[in-house]
């Protein structure tokens, strides 16, 4: 059935049992902001711990759109060059989506990636109407996530305590923005040492818990602002800039 394009942003969580240990779970948060023609909010969400999925209809003028989106992603500050990008082509059940077309689309995507000096990726063809192609896509997504260098790393307990505090404070603080002094005080209460402030702040930014842009990665300064609710900023900007 026809579905209205997303306006602003939608968020969905996806939880899977870890294949190496069925007692552990892996939770992925999917941010859908595909409905914005002029898009600025992605800059707040693309970090070195993101995985981007570009979904397109291969029967439309997709090369120009793919090229635009990839260039937009690459313009994101600091970490975009490290973010894996996955390509998903819809409407594979359409009679015009032939094997020849699929081959042409895959080759064109590889050409675009080469021109932008990005790693070449396969294109996954799916059909929502017939629910085809999704198991293969799902498995590839999980494999790609588990292959990331940060998976399995041990993080200090104080980081998770601070994450919990952020989830509480941002609901009562309006707007959900905090200066460096208040942020450091909250971090200290969670057992984070002064020498760890910069690194822990950058980790929470990369995890999508907060938004904080440092002049130098892994540092904080007295004039910095920490946004405790990334979606507040995303929704604010998408409400102002929307076509």
Image: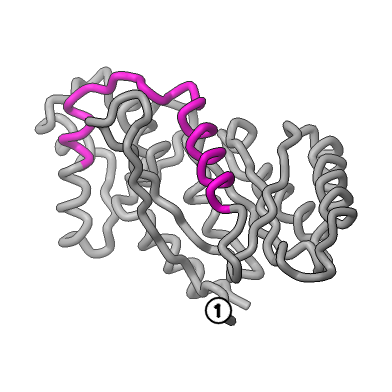
Image x and y of residue 5, in percent: 57, 75
- For label 1, the SS is loop
The region drawn magenta spans 134-163
> Of helix, strand and loop, which mostly describes the magenta segment?
helix
Please give the name of the residue rendered at 71% of the width and 66% of the height, measured from the top-left corner: 93
How was the colour assigned to the protein in this rendering? one colour
- What residue does disc 1 label? 3
Please give the name of the residue rendered at 17% of the width and 26% of the height, measured from the top-left corner: 157
Direction from residue 210 to residue 191 in the image, left or right = left
Vertically, is 62 above or below 161? Answer: below
Image x and y of residue 35, in percent: 58, 70
Q: Quadrant of residue 182?
A: top left
Vertically, is 4 above or below 191? Answer: below
Please give the name of the residue rendered at 72% of the width and 40% of the height, measured from the top-left corner: 122
Vertically, is 213 above or below 3? Answer: above
Direction from residue 150 to residue 158 in the image, left or right = left
Vertically, is 42 above or below 185? Answer: below
Could you tell me if residue 225 is visible in this image?
Answer: no
| Front-lying residue, 179 or 54 | 54
Q: Check residue 35 for magenta coloring.
A: no
Which quadrant is home to the N terminus? bottom right
Q: Quadrant of residue 191?
A: top left
Image x and y of residue 97, in percent: 81, 63
The crowd level at tag 1 (other Cα within 10 Å; few <14, some 14-19, many 20+) is few
């Amino acid at each position: 059935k026809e579905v209205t394009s997303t306006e602003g942003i939608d968020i969905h969580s996806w939880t899977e049992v870890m294949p190496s240990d069925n007692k552990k779970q892996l939770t992925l948060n999917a941010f859908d902001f595909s409905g914005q023609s002029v898009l600025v909010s992605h800059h707040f969400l693309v970090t070195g711990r993101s995985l981007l999925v570009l979904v397109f209809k291969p029967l439309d003028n997709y090369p120009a759109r793919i090229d635009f989106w990839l260039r937009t992603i690459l313009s994101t500050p600091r970490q975009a060059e490290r973010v894996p990008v996955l390509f998903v082509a819809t409407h594979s059940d359409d009679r015009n989506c032939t094997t020849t077309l699929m081959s042409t689309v895959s080759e064109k995507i590889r050409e675009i990636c080469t021109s932008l000096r990005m790693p070449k990726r396969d294109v996954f063809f799916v059909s929502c109407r017939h629910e085809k192609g999704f198991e293969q896509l799902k498995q590839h997504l999980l494999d790609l996530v588990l292959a990331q260098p940060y998976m399995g790393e041990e993080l200090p307990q104080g980081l998770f305590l601070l994450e919990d505090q952020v989830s509480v404070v941002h609901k009562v603080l309006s707007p959900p923005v905090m200066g460096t002094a208040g942020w450091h005080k909250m971090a200290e209460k969670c057992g984070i040492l002064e020498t760890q402030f910069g690194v822990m702040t950058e980790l929470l930014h990369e995890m999508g818990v907060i938004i904080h842009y440092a002049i130098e990665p892994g540092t904080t300064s007295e004039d910095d602002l920490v946004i405790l609710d990334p979606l507040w900023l995303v929704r604010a900007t998408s409400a102002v800039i929307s076509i």
